[in-house]
Image: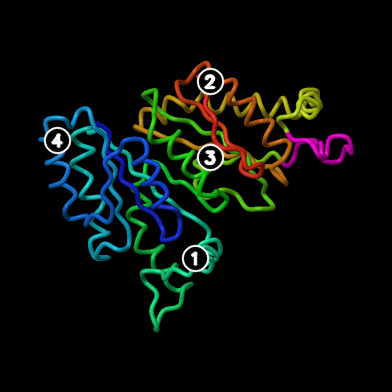
Amino acid sequence: MHLVIVSGLSGSGKSTALNALEDSAYNCIDNLPISLLPALVDQIQLHKDADNQNFAIGIDIRDAWQDLAMFPVAIKPLRDARLPFTVIFLDADADKIVQRFSETRRKHPLSNKHTNLTEAIETEQQLLLPMRDSADLVVDTSALNVHQLRELIKERVAEPDAEGMAVLFESFGFKHGPPNNADLVFDARCLPNPHWDPNLRSQTGIDQDVAQFLDEQPLVQDMLADVKEFLERWWPHYRANNRSYITIAIGCTGGQHRSVYLCEKLQAHFASQLDNVQVRHRELGHSTKESH
C-alpha cells in the first residue's frame, strides 16, 4: 500500500495531480476533512485488499481552515507507525495563480466581495503553511503545463520503482527566478558562458558542441567536482533524516547552457550510485526523465 496526500494552493494543479494518480490506479478521495484522516487510514488498513492498493487524498483550503493547523498532529501517528505515505504540496507564484484564475474565470475559494484575488492568495499561503512545512515533496508548478505536471506526478510519485531517496537535478535560469521547491541551490553564473560564442548561442547544454566547450573549461570541471564531493559527503545524512525526496537546483543566467550541462553530468554520475536519480530542465520545458 502507498498513501499519497496532495495539498497546495488553489490554482496550483491539485486536480491535475489527483487525476494523474487516479490514472495510475490510485483510489482518490478529494477534499477530505483533516479530522477524518486518522479514521480513514484505520479503515484502509482494515480492508482485506489494502496491501495491494494505493490511495490518494486531497486536502486543501476547502477544509475548515481551523483544521489545517492540525495537520502535523494528524499525520504524526502515520509517521510513528512508519506507514508508507507521501505528502505532496503544489506551489506556484502568485502572479501565475492570478493568471490561471483569470484564464479559467474560476473563483478563488477565499475571495468574496470584501477580499480580492491577491488578498485571497496571500491568506491561503499563510493558512496552508502547516501543510507545506509537513510536505515530503514540494512541486513548483509555475512553469509547468498540465501535461508536464501529470508526467512529473507519474514519474516522481505514482510509479516509484525503487525504494530510498528520490533525487532530482533541476536546471533553471536566474533571470526567471529560482525554483521555490529546491532543497539545495548552486549558482553557475560565474562559469565561462557558451552564450557569448555565436556558434553555441542557439544550442543548449544537452548538445554535443556545448558539452565539449564546457568539458574543456577548468573552472567548470572544478565546480562539477566540488558539487559531486559535497553531495557524496551529505547523502548519508539526508537519508538518515528519512528524506524521501531531494531537489538540487543549479542555475545560470538563462538556464540554457551551463546549468543544463551540470545537471546532465551530475545525473549521469549519480545514476550508478543511487536508485532513483532524475533530471529536469525548467527553461527548456523538458519533462523529468529517470535512469538507474
Q: Which mark is residue 104?
A: 1
Rounded to the nearest angstrom, the CA distance separating label 2 from label 3 is: 18 Å
* Image color mode: rainbow
Q: Earlier in the sequence, mark 1 or mark 4?
A: 4
Given this view, does label 1 or label 4 mark the residue nearer the observer?
1
Q: Residue furthest bottom?
A: 113
Given this view, does label 4 or label 3 mark the residue nearer the observer?
4
Mark 3 in CB contact with mark 1 (< 8 angstroms): no
Which segment did they paint magenta? 189-204
Q: Secondary structure at mark 2?
A: loop
Q: Secondary structure at mark 1?
A: helix
Q: Earlier in the sequence, mark 3 or mark 1?
A: 1
Q: Earlier in the sequence, mark 2 or mark 4?
A: 4
Residue behind mark 2: 271
Q: Which mark is residue 45?
A: 4
Mark 4 in CB contact with mark 3 (< 8 angstroms): no
